[in-house]
Image (cartoon, grey):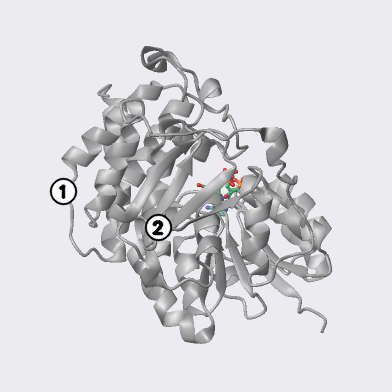
Amino acid sequence: MVPSLIRVAILGSTGSVGEQALDVIRLMPDRFEVVALAAHGRVERLRQQALEFRPRRLACRPGRDADALRAEAAAWGGAFAPLEEIATLPEVDVVLVATTGLASLHPTIAALRAGKKVAIANKETLVVGGHAVRAALDEGRALGAEIRPVDSEHSAIWQCLWGEAPESVETLTLTASGGAFRDWDLLALEAVTAQEALNHPTWKMGPKITIDSATLFNKALEAIEARWLFDIPLERVEILQHRESVIHSMVTFRDGSVKAQLGEPDMRLPVQVALLYPERGEAKPAPPLDLAKRGALHFGAVDEARFPALGIALEAGRREDTSAAAISGADESAVAHFLSGRIKFTDIARLLGRALEAHAPTRQPSLDELLAAEAWGRTFVDEAVTAGVT
Ligand SMILES: NC(=O)c1ccc[n+]([C@@H]2O[C@H](COP(=O)([O-])OP(=O)(O)OC[C@H]3O[C@@H](n4cnc5c(N)ncnc54)[C@H](OP(=O)(O)O)[C@@H]3O)[C@@H](O)[C@H]2O)c1
């Protein structure tokens, strides 16, 4: 039987995950059709992608370049559309959510309600809108809706869970490389530059997630994400330092068995797994794992004194109210201020601690309340930085 064509929409096609998804699609051109590409400011890169894949729908920031692209795309019947329309196009099977921030929260919810398979790389959508995203999944399930994790850690857990009964799961273990500063002297962290923080030891990623990896805030986002993806209390999600990022994550079952998924650190494999599920592709998008060559893998407990942002964000997540949304917004703003040189690296965690202390949480929040908490977090940090309080 000839396998059916998988029709894909990519939200965030010009970013690190988006570009790697297009690499996967280039490896199997007869398996995929790119129906839509959406980006924001990198319009020239979007144009190059559009000329290669000729998608029916496009989106990017308005302006002269966008107008020129709109005119060019008309030649193959391509048109611009809002993200929500792109995510629900009848001809789309899989929506890959690879934007940063909350740009794809409403499109993700709309896609699930419309019965789409949503391959989700973006963390903020689940950390802020987890309640609403799960409700949309329940609504769309009868129409075929699914959420497929793309992040390497969640993809690993997902793959370990295939064929397993939910009640047999005891704990999920997320592995953490430890980021750019895992071996630095604690005092030296006060003076690190954005360039040093952007130098991740094992992964090549966009700037926000790379800084979040250096503070380990990213690992807390992943734990909260896991809570929503796998419907498990945060208390049963553990974090283990693993320097080489070869074991992507693990599941411990109630009989004591532990399953892990391994591979070279390369996002193209989890992207391919999410796009093709339940099939295993024939293409090998990442370099093969050679354990004999690697020799040894290393593990250890996470040093919480080195990574205070981790504990603050996990505490926010455990509260199960608007705190995680507020802290996610606070971090969005703190990372932007660090990258622009206005605050020190260590100020990021200090500001997150202040934000968690100041936030007045709402229990059982609506989506509007979650979004308001996220915006509150951003404003709280912006005002603190403007006032010179860190
Ligand atoms: N990179 C990784 O290896 C990795 C791994 C796991 C999870 N993730 C998660 O995946 C998400 C994407 O990460 P990334 O590293 O790929 O980020 P990135 O390189 O910064 O790319 C972000 C993408 O989102 C687009 N975008 C931003 N705002 C948008 C908007 N309003 N409308 C439409 N598109 C918009 C950007 O467009 P322009 O570039 O055109 O402005 C770009 O294509 C993040 O949530 C991250 O935490 C990433």
Q: Is residue 305 left or right of residue 36?
A: left
Q: Which residue is more in the foreground, 108 or 316?
A: 316
Q: Earlier in the sequence, mark 2 or mark 1?
A: 2
Q: Residue at x 77, y 54 (%)?
A: 284
Amino acid type indicated by mark 2: Gly
**Coordinates of residue 221 in the picture (x, y in percent):** 40, 47
State the residue in front, 91 or 346. 346
Give the quadrant of the N terminus.
bottom right
Q: Which residue type carries mark 1?
A: Ala
User: Badge 1, how many Cα within 10 Å: few under 14, some, many 20+?
Assistant: few
Question: Between 320 and 160, which is closer to the camera in this rendering?
Answer: 160
In the picture, the quarter occupied by the C terminus is: top left
Q: Left of 126 or right of it: where is 145? A: right
- Classed neighbour count for the residue bearing mark 2: other residues with Cα under 10 Å, few (<14), some (14–19), many (≥20): few
Residue that badge 2 annotates: 256
How far from the left and from the top, in percent, is residue 120?
53, 60
Q: Is residue 233 left or right of residue 1?
A: left
Q: What residue is pinned by disc 1?
A: 360
Residue 142, visible in the rendered structure? yes
Q: Nearer the viewer, mark 2 or mark 1?
A: 2
Q: Based on the displayed image, in which of its 4 quarters is residue 150 positioned? A: bottom right
Mark 1 falls on what kind of element? Answer: loop
Q: Is residue 203 above or below residue 66?
A: above
